[in-house]
Image (cartoon, helix red, strand yellow):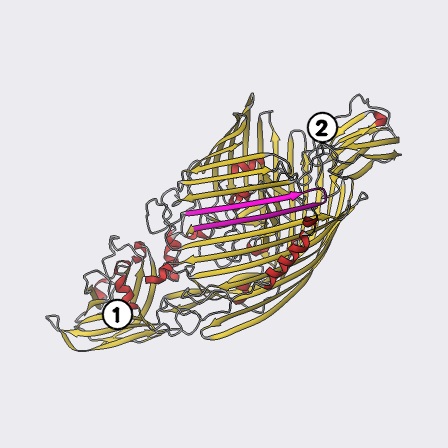
Amino acid sequence: MKLQGARLILVLLLIISGFEALSQDCKLVIRGKVIHLENNQTIPGAYIWIEEVKAGAVTDDSGNFIFRNLCPGDYTIKIQFLGHKDIIEEVTLTNSSFNKTFRMEELPTELGGVEVHGHRDAIQTTTAVNALYGSELLEARGENLGESLKRIAGVTTFSTGNTIAKPVIHGLHSNRIMILNNGIRLEGQQWGAEHAPEIDPFLAEEISVIKGAETVRFGPEAMGGVIMVNPGELPTEKKNKTDLYLVGGTNGRMGNLSLSHTGGSEKVKGLGYRVQGSVKRAGNVRSPEYFQGNTGMSEINFSGATGYSNSKLGTELYYSYFNTELGILRDAHTGNLSDLEEIIANGRPFTNPDFTHTINNPKQVVQHHLAKLKTHYHLNSKWKANLQYGFQLNQRQEYDRRRGDLNERASLDLELFTNTLDLFVDHTHENALSGTWGINIIQQANSNVPGTGVTPLIPNYDMLNAGLYLIEKYSKGPLELEGGLRYDYRMISTARFIGSELQESDLQYNNFTAFFGTYYQITPQLAFRSNLGSAWRPPNVNELFSQGLHHGAAAVEIGDADLDSEKSLKWVNSLEFEGNKSTGELTFYANQIRDYIYLNPTGETFVSLRGTFNVYEYLQANAFFWGVDFSGSYELTSKLQAYAKGSIIRARNTETDEFFPFIPSDRMDWGLSYQLATGTKTHHFNLSNMLVARQKREPVFDLAPAPPAYALFNVGYRYELPFQGNRLNIGLQVQNLFNTEFKEYMNRFRYFTADMGRNLLIKINYQF
Amino acid sequence: MKNLQKLPLYLLFVGLFAFASCESEDPVIENEGEVITDVTLAFTELDESGNPVGSAFEFTAADPEGIEVGGAPTIETVELEAGKTYRMEIEVFNSIENEDITEEILEEADEHQFYFLGSAFVGGASAPLSYTYDDASGELIGLRGTVTVSASPGLNNAQMRVVLRHDLDKSFPGADNPNFENFVQAGGESDLDITFPLILN
């Protein structure tokens, strides 16, 4: 696991030369961190010179530098970085060491030879940020967002079959976490367990996960964490790059192609663009013993961006389009409770279909448009004003097996418009303070498209959310302190017909949230982070107003319009270690949630001509979640590396002292990787073993007991070589090497089928 | 560059416009197109040569609210006479949409089939009723069939379970048996699952 933010690669790049260990008194240290004044992004590769000892150092990837074994006395620190104003600071060391964060100011662009850098802002947080990028992201290409994120310790998935996977952070998912598509909060129909995030992972150059409660920064619902899907920076000078990805998989005969091109204008300095698109097609998934009927999928995605920046102003226009058609396992769609019980008792689908790419009903067809305009203006060297506007349209159609002409009509047809507006100012100062103050407005309109021939599951509604926030951060050398406050007000008005009776309601919610975080670099190898944050989530429209049959699930769900907002307090602590041969990270968290909303089986059944159905109701109770994530690696030799990562989660209803359903069981992944470099070519080999325990903490009621523990083996090979002056990567992976039959507790289709069997993947990436 | 510097202002206007113009649609009454509210079993007595005797008599199961949360269905008790043979025709109706679903089932005969279960049909020699498909098209659907009541039934009251399967594999081994207890193995889902009480006179 690699870390962003204060990335732990704290390798001393330049050890003070010609400096002999001296007397007892000469053990003082000068430490610092160098960042951009403008956006707090760290500056790796800045040069630091101390005249008095004639010694130099270069900042590491996290912008850190250190000089050791200094005697008391006066020192002159000089910091230089291309295109930035030099910093010269006089320091007197007496008997304590010196720490400081240095903010470098950019020079005006009129000066020749100065580079205008891109404007992707660094996320200012003291909470642990884990990111997927580079070779790790390369290996995850071809997987959906949820599957890709499983590579981060503490992140699992809540899935529906093998094509729908929702990310779970520390046991929370759906509306309790937030996904940002290039900075805009993704607003789809995330309330549904079978509604996957509407985003193409190929548009990302980096996918980051913040594991803390981040409601203050991002608004309500970010209780469990935030996932940021970030495209790369747009070029600001003439530069062209094209990335081609080809992925093929044997299971489901999956094919996936993605092409992206970024370029910068020669004529207009600071103007850049990117276009990216991907297509994906897969057929019936194969479990070790059988095909899962109607589990194919197809996806067509596109995104484009253009941006302009100069020393004062930066503007970016971005659009992304996501379109998917997903088949739902035919056998999982049951008519009534006895159908459901029969298939669960059978433990596998009744049908034995052949392979096909054809997608029939039941299926989902989802389209998501997202447009973003972001602009910032430097009022002066310390203050920056920002405006970000996002428009989203989400169209979701779900088709069931129905009689006659109705089979051609969606039985759920939703159209969701979302506008988001952010206005905020950032300030940074040479002294140790920086911060953000802003307002955030979210407006949403959800409509059921008429003509489904089914009473809508959720009403039409309009929602307006206004938030006001303030975040301040104090940095001094290895210490960072951060705190924030936010107030939100939300208004929802709903309308629908129950029979021929119009039912309307207006609801209001409001809440204060606050957080406090700290980061401390204990030694150059060891850092500690701690974040205590409150968060809230107003109840969702489905939790308030569901009333009726959840088609296919043989369940009648009943909402409660009197539900209160969920309020949580999450405390995350992490210890990060980076040695010469080993790295490690240990995260411990506790999350107290008041009025946690959950779907509770009433134990009653509802009888109709169609048969019997279980009745579920939305209830609230206090909940307590805690857990541990760990990851680490050790270099056995210069070529051979061992690694391990895993997570443990405990969740309890503290009122009834019972367990909640669908909480990930204990799991770990460990393995070996071997690298063989010959000249400019590198061979990477990888062997990993994934161990997943049985979920022994089961809720009182479940349709079937938790499946047994399982172990899977995966192998991978990647060949990296220069090819006609460009870069070529050829990868070969085998997932579930021994074609083990298993069921994952977090997969809702464990009731009906075994999980995916062996899958052989070939992944080609060509950069030119 | 002067124009670009006013961009934030323009964007603000665009943003405000988009906010004001976006509201949800008024809700529309959605008629339940697929719900079955009435299932009628029509019995006509047959003589030894298979000709109808007298007029038909009906037993109905009704659930006017359909499948939504509401009252339980009302199911009439079927009364038949020992030793007699009947033609049984099933009519399926959606009273919400005023739509005859029997027609739709006939149109999709290859995807639908009725099964007759419960103690009335299943249980070997003790089962008082026996059923044979007799659909007009010759295809096994169960909209029309022949019910024979045992001359000396071991039970004088029993449960008559009527199941309509949709989207099943009709060629699945055993699926041609009207009393196929493992009908789920042929795939598909249940559109109807009603248990009529039966009294034999």
Disc 1 versus disc 2: nearer the observer = 2
Please identify the residue farthest to the left as the structure is shown: B49
* Quarter of the picture holding the N terminus of chain A: top right
Q: Residues within 10 Å of mark 1 (few under 14, many from 20)?
A: some
> Which residues are drawn in magenta?
A297-325
x%, y% of residue A574?
67, 43
Can residue A536 be seen at all in this image of the molecule? Answer: no
Give the chain letter at badge 2: A
Residue at 54% from the left image edge and 72% from the top image edge: A504
Q: Residue A695 placed where, x, y %?
A: 51, 49
* Left or right relative to A179: residue B47: left
- Three-letter residue code for mark 2: Leu
- Distance (Cα) linking label 1 and label 2: 85 Å
Marked residue chain, label 1: B
Residue A365: name its quadrant: bottom left
Q: Residue furthest bottom?
A: B54
Residue A658 picture quarter: bottom right
Task: Tell me: residue A529, above or below residue A617.
Answer: above
Q: Nearer the viewer, residue A198 or B42?
A: A198
Res. A765 in view = yes
Residue A58: within the magenta?
Answer: no
Residue A319 within the magenta-colored segment of the rendering:
yes
> Which label was assigned to residue B90?
1
Which of the numbered marks, if any, corresponds to residue A13? 2
x and y, in percent, of residue A372 in the image: 60, 51
Amino acid of disc 1: Ile
Q: Residues within 10 Å of mark 2 (few under 14, many from 20)?
A: few
Name above or below for residue B18 compared with residue A528: below
* Main secondary structure along the magenta-highlighted residues: strand
- Taking depth in this image into account, of B199 and A135 the one nearest to the observer is A135
Q: Is residue A471 above or below residue A479?
A: below
> Residue at position x 48%, y 59% from top?
A701
